[in-house]
Amino acid sequence: MTTPWRTARRSSAPRVAAPREPVDPARIGRRVVRRRAKGMDAGAVTAALEDARFDPRQNSRFEDLADDVRGRAELAEWERLAQLLADAPSGTVYSPDTDDVVQAELAADAAAAAARRAELREAARIAARADELQALRDLGTLDQAEPAEGDEAARDELTRRADVDAWLAHALAAHRGHYRDPAAREEAPGLLTPPVLAHAALLTELAHVDELVFAARLATAEPEAAGALAAFLTHARTEGH
């Protein structure tokens, strides 16, 4: 049985906080214009555009206001809306609900928000699984557990990984847990470190002596050499058949 590391228990409290969306002055400016323009006809938007053009001329006289990102964005948005209504049938009033640009932005925002929520859920799941692996290590029962999808990422959350690496290598070699799925085994090289992969390769070729500790030491110290040895043994076994 693997000797558990005597480390402090990890806190099960959530460690993942939702990132704050950075302030975007240009985006704020465009939203302000759209709120003001709602219900305006072409004439009213043109008048608002003239007012917006006057402000940059005034601001350009002052060095501290010359780099007005929001002001430039508002001016550009008024120009866009003026052109939009100029191309529309007479009497059309502006509505964000029928503005293709606005609707595309809203769809992109919704997709980005969904992706952020999915990332946060996955990060929370990985953190919880890392806590579970730590508890199994502390109890000395890690080697009895079945690895699950995502444990490769949970491994990175742990400060000491030698026993977890050995556990993953044994599971990969023996096709235990989610490694029963050939697709999971194909993805493993992109998720596990070279020493873990080399260890698993040696264990696969030395299945009848898979408890020999030299395999893990060799894989950790010289992963390339261990991988080459595993390939050589594979070739020798194949040729022998």
Image (spheres, helix red, strand yellow):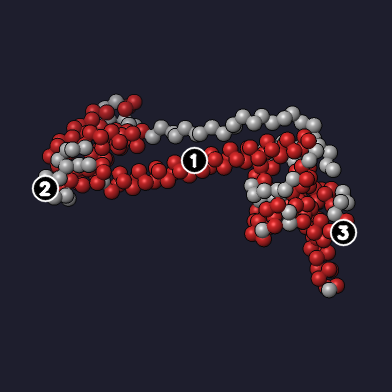
Determine which residue is flagged by label 2.
Answer: 90
The residues tagged by marks 3 and 1 sit, at their Cα atoms, a distance apart of: 46 Å
Type of amino acid at the residue the image marks with label 2: Ser
Instruction: Tell me the residue at 72%/48% (across/down).
Output: 146
Type of amino acid at the residue the image marks with label 3: His
Determine which residue is flagged by label 3.
Answer: 208
The residues tagged by marks 2 and 1 sit, at their Cα atoms, a distance apart of: 43 Å
Residue 117: numbered disc: 1
The percent position of residue 206, horizontal first and vertical second, equals 85, 59
The percent position of residue 117, horizontal first and vertical second, equals 49, 40
Q: Residues within 10 Å of mark 2 (few under 14, many from 20)?
A: few
Question: Image quarter for residue 141?
Answer: top right
Instruction: Tell me the residue at 39%/42% (across/down).
Output: 109
For residue 227, side relative to residue 101 (left or right): right
Instruction: Tell me the residue at 11%/45% (across/down).
Output: 91
Looking at this view, is 208 or 216 the one in front? 208
Eye-nearest disc, 3 or 2: 3
Going from the N terminus, do you reach mark 2 or mark 1 first? 2
Type of amino acid at the residue the image marks with label 1: Arg
Going from the N terminus, do you reach mark 3 or mark 1 first? 1
Instruction: Tell me the residue at 65%/44% (across/down).
Output: 153
Going from the N terminus, do you reach mark 3 or mark 2 first? 2
**SS state under label 3:** helix
**SS state under label 2:** loop
Q: Residues within 10 Å of mark 3 (few under 14, many from 20)?
A: few
Query: Cβ–Cβ below 8 Å for labels 2 and 1?
Result: no
